[in-house]
Image (cartoon, coloured by chain):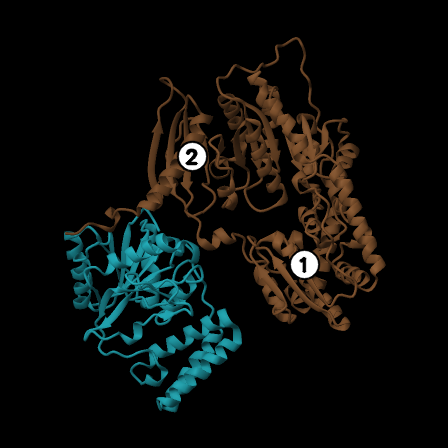
Chain colours: A brown, B cyan
Amino acid sequence: MSDLASHTPADPALVAHLTAGIAEARSIYELLFPTQQLFFVLSQGNNPIWAAPEVIEGPHNPRPQDLGADYLGTLTRPGAYDGAPQVTIRLAIPRLPLPGEIKQIDSPWRPMRGLGALFRASPLWYEQVRYGAEMARKRQADRRTDQTAMPLGDGSALLPAPVAPDSDKRPAILIGMHWLEMGGAEKLGFDTMRWALAAGLRVFVVASVPAVQRLADKLPDHPDLTFIRLDRYLPHHLWPRYVQRLAMAENIRAVHIHHCTPLYESLTMLRMHMPWVQTIDSTHIVEHANGGYPRISGVWSNYLDMQHVISGELVRYFRDRFHAPAGKVVLGRMLDRKNNDALPPLRLQAGQKTLHACFIGRLFYQKRPVVVVEALRALNAWAGRNGVTLTATIVGEGPYDGTLTRLLRKHGLSSKVDLLPGNTDIPALLERSDILLLPSNNEGLALVCYEAVAHGCIPISTRVGSQDEVLPDGLLVPLAPRAAVAGTVAAVDAMWRDAGTLARHKDALQAAWTRLTADPTAEEVLMPVYRRLAQRDAA
Amino acid sequence: MSVLNKTAAVIVTFNRSGKLMAVLDALAAQTMRPDIVLVVDNASTDDTAALVQARADADPTIRHLRLPANVGGAGGFHAGIKAAYQMGAQYFWVSDDDAYPRPDALQSLHRALTSFQADNGWRPSFACSRVEWIDGSLCEMNCPRTVWDWARFVRPGSAWALVDSASFVSVMIPRWAVSEHGLPIADYFIWFDDAEYTRRIARSYPGIFVPESVVVHDTPDNRGVNFGLVDDKSLWKFKYGARNETSWRRREMGLMGVLAYAYGVRGQMRRGDVPSSLRRQIYGAIIKGLGFRPAIERV
């Protein structure tokens, strides 16, 4: 008789994937529990991003759910000594993501329940209602969220303070990311990895949010960089213990937090047991609903040695709300000195007969893609009245993909607006665009505005975050969606109709650019810290 | 794609013990035998129970799931897939009691499912065989429905067209599809349960038609499902079919979908010169289907 199906050999690629996943998970737990006896209960997961880890410390009686249909088997790592405590780790090794999940894992966006008819009737009024709710949450946020820095005792001389042990390993830094996906904070995170490597540090990277981590293949290809998949395999409550173990094992001298919540929660462990570890964070946007990462950073500010921010608004935020001491909050712009030569001429001319507008951003609510389409619709009507030929390009991917396509079709804009994926050549696009639309719900200081100006394109943005540091009043429009659309058309009309207004805006952009480039860059404020850390042991 | 390959064959039977034994013979001769052969017996009144029990005594892979009453093909597939799911199967090969798989039919389906994902990244929601009639021609009632881009991954050596609907005659369904989409609708009793189910699971990703996997469907004649063929003898089945498809169209497409369906049925019956008394009963079933909203059971 032939073999049963269950005896059929598995696909070698799948076996390799599972073997690699098991090895990744083992290395995490073997570091976390160096002496304990470890039982790994492994199953084949049906989730592409999360291993649903469960850690049971102490004796564990196997349960039926340990041996379900997807059960792969167990592995045992003996304890370091007889009678070592037992730890059982249940893991469902994530499956390979599907092509659609690699492209976009979020479900397509849908209007909120009960508001679908409103959206179909008027997308802009729908946005207006949502904006109203958002602002109501913002008003309540200050009352609901903690806005006080937690106190940190220095300890007393009565008891000895922990001292850094000698290590034969070169100094290292732990860089904590939110995730490895597209975004401004993520760009800075990747930059800091390159700078740390250039300074001579070994780099360990972790991400807090389970995700496909699409940009993992963009990590610097360097033998001193290690990406540890805690996001897949380690529950957040175990991160502080893991961070301590890793820091001891790898001579980690600094932790740099880029929107990584469990690393904030690890600060207590570091301050108590490893006070010599330098703690740094970088923050970008104060969120309407709860203050976002700057508020978290403010609450932990006494535990941080350095709070790096990208805008003057955030400097004031930490100073005024959390009473951060001078010198702790450090402004470092996300600018590259290499690109700080004189600005090219801004392309838009009064009375020109064509206008190319562009939008560049992830198609998530924060960027308000629906408002982008409504602004393009209004601009198209304006262009028709004034004998101007409007074309536009929208670059980005996200849950609003389908909505955007349908809205453009509905408004008769499909032939005028190109939808391009996120890997489009952005500089080339900006060099053929007259204006950049940025009607975001919130921003820190949008990098794309820098880029636009540097390529001769004029940005028009909502008045959010620190956008007023890079744009003059005439290019800032109200946040309310209907007013944002009307303001965008008014701003374009004013520049197109009146050469004087256009010239004033161009001068103001030039002046803002000059002001910004006079500030230190993120690289200039962080590199000395990294170099100091790298050289401390070398000295 | 699964590293775990435990496979259950789910065969629903009713009073056709002779043909069922031929199916069990064909399964025993497979180049990749199912780990479980679950015979779902719709309370047969012939010698099915005794024959299956005798086989099961000699072959531990055979399980006899005798239902207390005849719940139709839909109820049988519902109960069978549910039981096989609880037995831990990773793949469910689902078929009728009068369809004989060629020796490599199951292995071909399994290989196609795993290879397709390894080669293209996407995981098909099912794989279905080429179903032939006893004379070697295509079995009309078991022809799967292709999607618009069916040829996307068709290549020499792996000519697997994308399909979104297939009959429960030699179709292999992976466990994840059952986990995500639930079980076939038992309340349909008969007809359209397979089309509804495969279309439902194909929302995740279409299935694939695997022509190198062949089964022979031993039906009395080779006729497709066409309302122009309604006669007194087959009326009861067509009524179930009309009710069930109406219910599905109401759920998925709304009233316009039902109207389009009713218009199509009317055209088929007119062209087939179906007597008006039978037509009225079919229209009655369509009206009944408007209010027929059976629940989908999850596992």
Rendered view: B19 above or below A310: below
Q: Nearer the viewer, mark 2 or mark 1?
A: 1
User: Residue A303: x and y, percent?
Assistant: 66, 26
* Mark 1 secondary-structure assignment: loop
Badge 2 density bin: few <14, some 14–19, many ≥20, Cα 10 Å: many
- A157 sits left or right of A515 in the view: left
Amino acid at circle 2? Ala
In the rendered image, the vertical position of residue A65 relative to residue A154, given as above or below: below
Q: Is residue A360 above or below residue A190?
A: below
Give the letter of the chain under mark 1. A
Query: For mark 1, does the 10 Å Cα neighbourhood hold few (<14), some (14 to 19), or many (20 or more) residues?
Result: many
The structure residue drawn at horizontal position 33% and vertical position 68%, both measured from the top left corner, is: B167
Q: On what subunit does the disc labeled 2 rest?
A: A
Question: Residue B203 has which mark?
Answer: none
Contact between marks 2 and 1 (CB within 8 A): the answer is no
Q: Residue furthest right?
A: A500
Image position, residue A325 (x, y; %):
76, 26
Work out which quarter of the rendered image holds the C terminus of chain B and state it: bottom left
The first of marks 2 and 1 along the sequence is: 2
User: Which residue is situated farthest in the top direction here?
Assistant: A158
Q: Helix, strand or loop at disc 2?
A: helix
Which residue is more in the foreground, B97 or A259?
Answer: A259
* Residue B84, percent from left and from top: 31, 54
Residue B39 seen:
yes
Mark 2 and mark 1 on one chain:
yes
Residue A433: give its label. Answer: 1
Taking depth in this image into account, of A210 and B118 the one nearest to the observer is: B118
Residue topped by disc 2: A25
Q: Is residue A122 left or right of residue A242?
A: right
In the displayed structure, does residue A315 sit left or right of residue B157? right
Q: Position of residue B30 (x, y in %)?
A: 19, 57
Residue kind at label 1, given as amino acid type: Ser
